[in-house]
Amino acid sequence: MSKKGKKAKTPLSDEEQLLLFQQRLLADEEVARRKERLLSVFLKDKLAKEEHNSALNLNKINTQWRTVLREVKTKELHKDIEILSQTFERVVDCKDSVIKSLAKDLSEADEQYAHALRSHMHNIDQLLALQRCRLNLLEENYSMELETLTKEFEIERKTIIEQHEKEIRYLQDVFMAMEQNYIDSEYESKLEFQSMWDDLKNKNIEEKHFLRLQLESVVEDLWRRFQDALKNYTDATEDRKIAFETLKVKDEKSSKDIEVQMKRIQKLQDSILILKGKIMVHSRESEEQNQYIRDDKELVLVQLRKLKAQRTHVREIAQENLVKLTLESNATLKVLRAIVDKGEKILKLAEICRKFETEAEKVLPFYSSILTPEEQEEIEEIIPEELTEELAKVIADYIGMDNFWKRFNKVKLEQLSLQQRRTQLLEINGKLREMLKRYLDGISVSDEVLSQLNPLFIVNYRSNLPQALSKPTTQPDDKKSPATYNIIEAAHVISHIL
């Protein structure tokens, strides 16, 4: 009974106390987690209800607000529709009147357009013929340059391909020789490796037997000592025999583990030695092979640099040729676009000027030359002697513009004549105004008029007007002042227009 009581009152060990403390902590953590889960579920339900209620209230407010806005918007739209209907009626009336006037203008414009179209098409045909001639010349020059460039490119390409094929054959031969040398060296290294491996294996077996013999002698001595100590120990400590047996079992297990580990260590040492030998052999072979490969690599790199330099040089030449070709093509395109824009501008101006032409100009747009046949023959005899090659080429290019220059010169002459007529009419108008003013001053009675000579007072068939107002008497011997005319050279006009 006393033994049982002692066993019941024995205190708990440290490990048991730790286990109890961990169990209590785990139970407290589980309770706290359950509480947190319940709170999160409760809060989520509450939040979902609040969101649902807020969405319903927002929908109700939006529906009521939309009804109010619709009523206000309908009133505004009714007012806008009334105003728009009135303005629409006014606009329709205005448009009807405009349409009637435009219909009349259209009928007149159609007649003018038909006449203008005929003359316009004639001028366009002439301009197109000129442009086609120029384009044919440009295309011929372009095709000639392109053929020369393609021939040069093909010749350079063939030379490069031949050099490349020669170098590839040379590299293939070098590669085959390297492979043959590598196969021979590999066979020799394998034989050396096999012989070294057999020697090392025999040495390791001998060392292993020697170590086993030493260890067996040491273990036997230790076993004897252990038996003597065991007897003394059993005699001295019978009470602790049970504990010793347990420790012995443990010792046997640990000794077995030690033997296993020793075997593993021995195997690892053997493998390390073998691998070190292999590494040394392979490092020597790899260094020799790397040296051969480096030398070959340097030779190949030198050849590759030469090829790259040649390729870059060829590319630069081809790129320069391509850049020149693109620049010339872009320049020609720009010139052609400028010519097309200029032609369109001239045609638009011709359409605008067509509205201001008279009926005579519409019927006979090009007048015949004013010169007599004798004068024309003299000019034809004089001109070929004075013409140079460049000027003759320019004149030949612009023969198709004769009709245009005729109309231009005719308009220029009419403009000059109208300006002279305007100056004459302005002078006459000024004289008439002075005469009218003096007449009105003579009719009226005032201090200023009475203080001066009255132009209406005639004495002895003579008026008080100054002699400057009277027209000068022209005698047949008097000569008139020569009229001045502005003359524009054709070369100057061509340089500024084209």
Image (tube, rainbow, N blue to C red):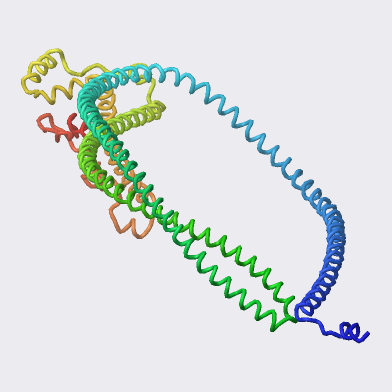
Q: How many numbered markers are drawn?
A: 0
> Which quadrant: the C terminus?
top left
Q: Is residue 44 visible?
A: yes
- Examine the rendered structure and indicate whether residue 334 appears above or below residue 46: above
Corner quadrant of residue 314: top left
Q: Residue furthest right?
A: 1
Q: What is the x, y in percent for residue 440?
A: 37, 48
The residue nearer to you, when weighing 469 against 5, is: 5
Q: What is the x, y in percent for residue 6?
A: 87, 86
- Examine the rendered structure and indicate whether residue 74 appears above or below residue 140: below
> Which quadrant: the N terminus?
bottom right
Q: Is residue 487 visible?
A: no
Q: Is residue 82 left or right of residue 484?
A: right
The residue nearer to you, when weighing 231 against 28, is: 231
Corner quadrant of residue 303: top left
Q: What is the x, y in percent for residue 168?
A: 25, 31
Q: Residue furthest left?
A: 385
- Examine the rendered structure and indicate whether residue 80 appears above or below residue 365: below
Residue at 48% over, 23% down: 109
Q: What is the x, y in percent for residue 194?
A: 36, 44
